[in-house]
Structure formats: structure tokens, C-alpha cells
Amino acid sequence: MRKALERAAAELNERLVKTHGRITKLDANIDSGISGATVRIVTVVDDSDPRPKYVLWANEVGGGEATALRRAQDKINAQLSKLRGEVAGFYLKFIAPPLPKRTYATLIVAVNEEVPEKVRKLSLEERRERLAAVLRLLGNDPKVINLAQMAKVFGVSRDTIYKDLEELGIRR
């Protein structure tokens, strides 16, 4: 189950980094059996409000549903405490295999991070000036910047950062 969750969340998060907007809805489906697990996670993204966004997950075991849920919540809340943003949706599923006193709680949470007002309100020229300043600090080597992280900081897509770099005369 954990491998299937990890793979599904990683693939979705990779796409979300490249997608302009914020998550408005999350739905998921988990099937598990002797042969393995299948995890499907679907998000709906509203492109009118760009933000960094991603999906977090926890799959915890307990003697019963209450214990498993508490452990999953603790794990998710520990991750959320390091963020500033909003929960856009969640999915919860309990799985009780035929083992005595063993229940798994799977919790999947969609998160939209806040974009600082200063960054969110930057004009195109201001954003490019800041990007150029970052590049100067890094020795004008565009290969040392993380495009996904820059897009996240500025609340734009990676494609927008590529265009900004081209406008600054920098090829990556």
C-alpha cells in the first residue's frame, strides 16, 4: 500500500508543480488485496488563483480505527505545521486485513500554500528583476536554480519562469 501511495502522490505532485492554479477538490480511490494495491488520486485545479500545491499522505496502523486514524492525523498534522496554507480536501479509508487487532488508516490531503502578498503582487517586470538578481547572486549560472522552486516562490508555472529567463537573455 505504501509504495502505491508514494508512487501515486509523487506522480500527481510532479504534475501539480507544472499546473497553474489551486486545488479546489480532491477525490481518491484505494483498492488493496493479496496481489497488491492500486491508488488513484484526482484533483480539480482552478487556474484563476496560482499557488504552490501538493498532496500529502499517511498510511498508519493501529489496533483499531481510532488508533490508526490518530496516528495518520498526527503524521499529516506534523507536515501541515511546517506549511502556511489551506487544506483543499481530504480522503480517508480504513482497511482491516484478516489479522487480529490490526487496522490501517489511509489519509490523503490536498494542500494549497499561501503566496506571500509581496510576491503575489509583483508585476512581470518586478518578478523578472528579482529573478535576475537571484541569478547574479548565483554567478549568472541558470543551471544552479531550481525552476520548480522559483515557480513555487513566485506563484507561477515553470513555463513562465522559462519565458522570464529567455526575456532576460538566459538560455537554460
Image (cartoon, grey):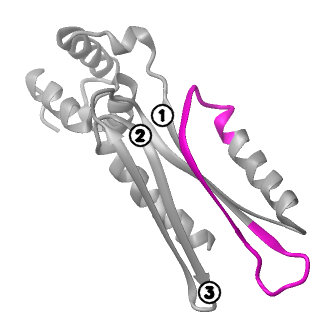
The answer to whether residue 109 is visible is no
User: What amino acid is found at the position of numbered circle 1 in the picture?
Assistant: Asn
Residue occupying image coordinates x 75% and y 48%: 73
Q: Earlier in the sequence, mark 2 or mark 3?
A: 2
| x, y percent for residue 16 | 36, 46
Under circle 3, the secondary element is strand
The residue indicated by pointer 2 is: 23
Q: Are marks 2 and 1 in contact (CB under 8 Å)?
A: yes
The residue indicated by pointer 3 is: 33
Q: Which of the numbered marks, if any, corresponds to residue 13?
A: none
Q: Earlier in the sequence, mark 3 or mark 1?
A: 3
Position of 39 compared to 67: left or right? left
The answer to whether residue 126 is visible is yes
For the residues marked 2 and 1, what is the alpha-carbon distance in whole angstroms? Answer: 6 Å
Under circle 2, the secondary element is strand
The span picked out in magenta is: 79-104
Residue occupying image coordinates x 42% and y 10%: 117
| x, y percent for residue 1 | 62, 74
Q: Which of the numbered marks, if any, corresponds to residue 112?
A: 1
Using the image, determine if residue 59 lies above or below residue 144.
Answer: below
For the residues marked 2 and 3, what is the alpha-carbon distance in whole angstroms? Answer: 30 Å
User: What amino acid is found at the position of numbered circle 3 in the picture?
Assistant: Gly
Q: Is residue 102 magenta?
A: yes
Q: Earlier in the sequence, mark 2 or mark 1?
A: 2
Position of 144 compared to 58: left or right? left
The image quarter in which residue 145 lies: top left
User: What amino acid is found at the position of numbered circle 2 in the picture?
Assistant: Ile
